[in-house]
Image (cartoon, rainbow, N blue to C red):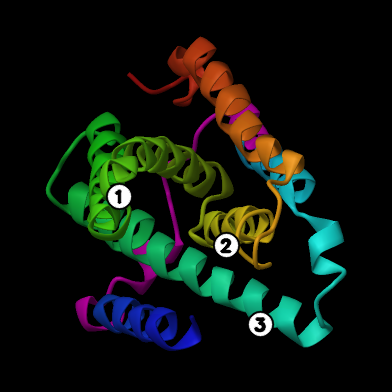
């Protein structure tokens, strides 16, 4: 996993460097209301609950660290591309913040449709779920004022999912993985209910 993911990571941040976008990518100057901190907190708690600690106990420390770092490469690479370059590019074109949130999330989900090559029609619901995750990571970027926290959480979320699905041969489904689905549901309902209270009170 390290080689392709590491190459993608280097490419992403090389593009950021060539464009001279280090500050807009890593610094988000569009704050949201403080309650939005609930989004990364919920994702953090659910990610920790979704980790299959029993399965990890059968692995070496080196294996666990290698898998965790590989997932962080995914988090930093994808967040750098979609919440970093993507959000910055859309803002540079003068889109409203609502459209920036929408299109950066839609593109993020659409890219995952390429998984249809190996997984067929199951890639469609995955792409939809990923689009929602993209929006939640976008909110995390804005409330934290940086592209760091969402990158770390993205990697941790993927790590938790992988520990409950593919790290062991013929592994039984891990019931704790349901916590990842729970994160989507809780955050989705929360954001839906408070969608008119995301932007600062002074915003139009």
Of pointers 2 and 1, the one earlier in the residue sequence: 1
Would residue 29 be counted in the magenta stretch? Answer: yes
Instruction: Name the secondary structure under disc 1.
Output: helix
Disc 1 to disc 3, how far (Cα)? Answer: 25 Å
**Which quadrant of the structure image shows residue 18?**
bottom left
Residue at horizontal 41 percent and vertical 37 percent from the top: 129
Instruction: Name the secondary structure under disc 3.
Output: helix
**Which quadrant of the structure image shows residue 187?**
top right
The correct choice, above or below, for 122 with respect to 146 in the image is above
Disc 2 to disc 1, how far (Cα)? Answer: 15 Å
Disc 2 to disc 3, how far (Cα)? Answer: 13 Å
Q: Residues within 10 Å of mark 3 (few under 14, many from 20)?
A: some
Q: Which residue is mark 3?
A: 66
Residue 125, numbered circle: none
Q: Is residue 34 something that shows in the picture?
A: no
Q: Which residue is mark 1?
A: 108
Q: Which residue is mark 2?
A: 155
Residue farthest along the left direction in this orientation: 93
Q: Nearer the viewer, mark 1 or mark 3?
A: 3
- Residue 24 % position (x, y): 35, 62
**Magenta residue span:** 17-38
Q: Is residue 97 something that shows in the picture?
A: yes
The correct choice, above or below, for 141 with respect to 39 in the image is below
Residue at horizontal 25 percent and vertical 52 percent from the top: 116
- Residue 171 % position (x, y): 69, 58
Would residue 85 be counted in the magenta stretch? Answer: no
Viewport quadrant of the C terminus: top left
Q: Nearer the viewer, mark 2 or mark 3?
A: 3
């Amino acid at each position: 996993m390290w080689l392709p993911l590491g190459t993608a990571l280097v490419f992403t941040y090389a593009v950021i460097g060539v464009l001279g976008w280090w500050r807009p990518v890593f610094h988000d100057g569009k704050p949201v209301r403080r309650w939005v901190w609930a989004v990364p907190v919920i994702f953090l708690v659910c990610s920790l609950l979704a980790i299959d600690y029993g399965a990890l106990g059968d692995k070496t420390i080196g294996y666990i660290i290698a898998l965790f770092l590989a997932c962080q490469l995914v988090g930093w690479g994808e967040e750098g591309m979609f919440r970093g370059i993507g959000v910055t590019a859309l803002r540079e074109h003068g889109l409203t913040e609502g459209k920036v949130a929408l299109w950066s999330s839609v593109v993020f989900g659409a890219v995952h449709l390429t998984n249809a090559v190996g997984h067929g029609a199951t890639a469609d619901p995955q792409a939809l779920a990923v689009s929602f995750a993209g929006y939640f990571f976008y909110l995390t970027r804005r409330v934290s004022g940086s592209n760091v926290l969402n990158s770390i959480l993205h990697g941790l979320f993927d790590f938790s999912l992988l520990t409950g699905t593919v790290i062991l041969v013929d592994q039984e489904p891990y019931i704790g993985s349901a916590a990842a689905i729970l994160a989507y549901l809780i955050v989705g309902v929360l954001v839906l209910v408070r969608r008119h209270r995301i932007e600062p009170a002074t915003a139009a």
